[in-house]
Amino acid sequence: MYHFKFYAPTKVVFGRNTEEQLTDLVWEFGGKKLLIHYGGGSVIRSGLLQKVKDQLDSSGISYVSLGGAVPNPRLGLVYQGIELCRREGVDFILAVGGGSAIDSARKLSEKDMLAIYQASR
């Protein structure tokens, strides 16, 4: 049996106009650079993604974006996100949208668990 510790704090904030709390949440967790992870379609059409970006821009919080979240996160997208986070120095992942974005963001935050497992063998 392999021994390891895993810690992935998650906070889900959901509801009407919760994007207005974004700056406070980022500062609460000490975030310096965000990855905004979203699916597409409705989050763009509704204007929510733009509201989130506007909040971050007005607060001076830097971010990068990764769209394309789908149900049952695709490994390729997860690895693309992990690489983007490493390259850009991301320390805060923000899922914007529904369950698919949240699921993918959780996988991104776990980093590369398969590589960690294989390295321990």
Image: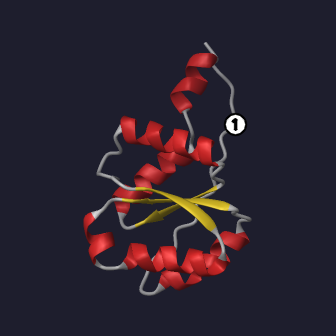
* For residue 83, side relative to residue 90 (left or right): left
Q: Compared to 31, does 71 lie above or below?
A: above
* For residue 70, side relative to residue 116 (left or right): left
Q: Which residue is mark 1?
A: 5
Q: Quadrant of the C terminus?
A: top right
Q: Position of residue 45 (x, y in %)?
A: 27, 75
Q: Position of residue 91 (x, y in %)?
A: 66, 54
| Image point (35%, 79%), residue name | 47
* For residue 62, side relative to residue 37 (left or right): right
Number of residues whose C-alpha sits closer than 10 Å to that of mark 1, classed few (under 14), some (14–19) or many (20 or more): few
| Image point (69%, 63%), residue name | 31
Amino acid type of the residue tagged 1 in the rendering: Lys
Picture quadrant where residue 110 is located: top right
Comparing 17 with 32, the one in front is 32
| Image point (46%, 87%), residue name | 17
Q: Position of residue 94 (x, y in %)?
A: 52, 63
The secondary structure type at the circle numbered 1 is loop
Picture quadrant where residue 87 is located: top right
Comparing 87 with 39, the one in front is 87
